[in-house]
Amino acid sequence: MLQQFADWIAYSLLGLDAQTRLGAAIDFFFYDTTKILILLFIISAIMGIINAYFPIDRLRNYLTSHKLYGLQYFFASLFGAITPFCSCSSIPLFIGFVKGGIPLGVTFAFLITSPLVNEVAVAMFLGTFGVKITVIYVISGMLLGMVGGFVLGKMKLENYLSDWVKKIQKDSQAEAAKWETEKVSFLHRLPGILKESWGIIKGVLLYVIIGIAIGGAIHGYVPEGFFQEYMSKGSWFAVPLSVILGVPMYANAAGIVPVIEVFVAKGVPIGTALAFMMAVVGLSLPEATLLKKVMTWKLIGIFFGTITLFIIILGYLYNIIL
């Protein structure tokens, strides 16, 4: 339905040709922008309802005060793996988790894993590369989320969240406490929850538009052969170079799997190709633009730098064992 809406705007209303790069870029822009804004509103409303009725303070206190031996990172990564979101679509849930006071390391575990692993990409991997590589891909993607979330959580980076999201946290907790004290009914709480969700939409709208516009331009205009030329080199720097080249790209895991298949068929080492894929789906300029509303540039740099390092290490390991 959303794709039909985007197609109607790009190809019927604006009269663009679907076979041109401009047409593909504009279609991509309207589809992704609409999808992310709808997701953000729905998830913000759901998290508002949960915050109003579920003892989120107890959950937060439990996660921070009990030794769960890493299970909290496992479940966050597992949840990320079963949600079919790209890096930008994961941001609404990330905002919801942060708003609810879930520990930052746990939210990072979700944010890292969600775009890397999903059921559609797994099915395509099975058909393209077989069981062995698919299993290694899924396990390593979840491990990357768990380890990345754990490392980032230990850095105590909460102070580097943006003032905007800190205010949302504070207002949400204060309003939930007020409703609980006054025993406000759900019907009377709902307008406030929806108003807050709409406020979040307005707060990130500019960042969504800029981020998806960048993604649309990349999606429509960056030639794949440019990347393949440099990734095919067998030198030691091919893996880090493939990760650096992948960051400006923007696609979901399912969309990039056919490209990876072509790369491998043309001689690109599979570890290098998978590292490129992880950089494309797990780190992107549009994602960084969206995250700017939630994080300071320093926190974005730490997040991107940490995950980039882990992806490079995985790329080398893939080339050794596969």
Image (spheres, rainbow, N blue to C red):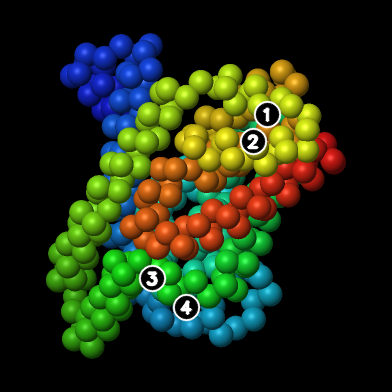
Q: Amino acid at mark 2?
A: Ser
Mark 4 or mark 1: whose residue is earlier in sequence: 4
- Say which quadrant the C terminus sits in: top right
Q: CA distance from mark 3 to mark 4?
A: 10 Å
Q: Would residue 216 be visible to someone looking at this image?
A: yes
Please say if the residues under marks 3 and 4 sit with CB atoms less than 8 Å apart. Answer: yes
Q: Would residue 134 be visible to someone looking at this image?
A: no
Mark 4 or mark 2: whose residue is earlier in sequence: 4
Mark 1 or mark 3: whose residue is earlier in sequence: 3
Q: Nearer the viewer, residue 129 or 288?
A: 288
Q: Which mark is residue 242?
A: 2
Q: Is residue 13 above or below residue 102?
A: above
Tell me what residue is drawn at x 30 percent, y 25 percent.
26
Q: CA distance from mark 3 to mark 2?
A: 36 Å
* Residues packed near mark 1 inside 10 Å, few (<14), some (14 to 19) or many (20 plus): many
Q: Is residue 67 above or below residue 276?
A: below
Q: CA distance from mark 4 to mark 2?
A: 40 Å
